[in-house]
Amino acid sequence: MANNQKQPTNQTFDDREIMNDILTSQKFITETYNTCANECSSAAMKTELMNILNEEHQIQHEIFGEMSKRGWYQTDNAPQNKVDAVKQKYSPQAGQ
């Protein structure tokens, strides 16, 4: 009888891959808590879920900050004219 099980490899992940996996996990966690909070019928439960969601967002932000500081997660700054256009579009006066 043939053994079809894969043999473990000695492949290791570097710090960047580990941090990327952690950030991806945090994004999934915040998405899940957000959905639960949106669909919660109990005000007390919603408050608690929102507190947890805030904590998870803080963790996610700290991970992002570490990755960004190390050059592992690059973001481009939006041109000021685009920022101004979005502000104008979504300002309270724009809907009047």
Image (cartoon, helix red, strand yellow):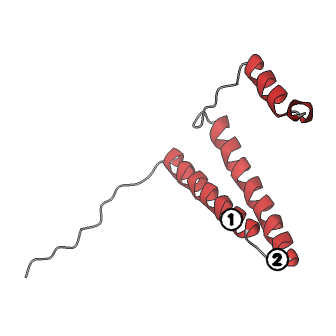
Please say if 29 is above or below 91. below
Compare residues 15 and 29 and report the one nearer the observer. Answer: 29
SS type, badge 1 = helix
Q: Is residue 70 left or right of residue 39?
A: left
Location of the C terminus by quadrant is top right
Residue 35: image quadrant is bottom right
Q: Which mark is residue 3?
A: none
| Mark toward the start of the polypeptide (1 vs 2) | 1
Please say if 33 is above or below 93. below
Q: Residue furthest front?
A: 96
Q: Which mark is residue 45?
A: 2
Q: Which residue type carries mark 1? A: Thr
Query: Where does label 1 land, which residue?
Result: 35
- Label 2 crowd (10 A; few <14 / some 14-19 / many >=20): few
SS type, badge 2 = helix
Compare residues 77 and 7 and report the one nearer the observer. Answer: 77
Residue 14 drawn at (x, y percent) = 47, 48
Residue 84 drawn at (x, y percent) = 81, 22
Residue 43 drawn at (x, y percent) = 87, 75
Please say if 75 is above or below 30. above
Which residue is found at the position 9% from the left and 77% from the top?
A: 2
Per the model, the C-alpha gap separating discs 1 and 2 is 13 Å
Residue 39 drawn at (x, y percent) = 73, 70
Q: Is residue 28 left or right of residue 44?
A: left
Please say if 60 is above or below 33. above
Q: Which residue type carries mark 2? A: Met
Which residue is found at the position 82% from the left and 77% from the top?
A: 45
- Label 1 crowd (10 A; few <14 / some 14-19 / many >=20): few
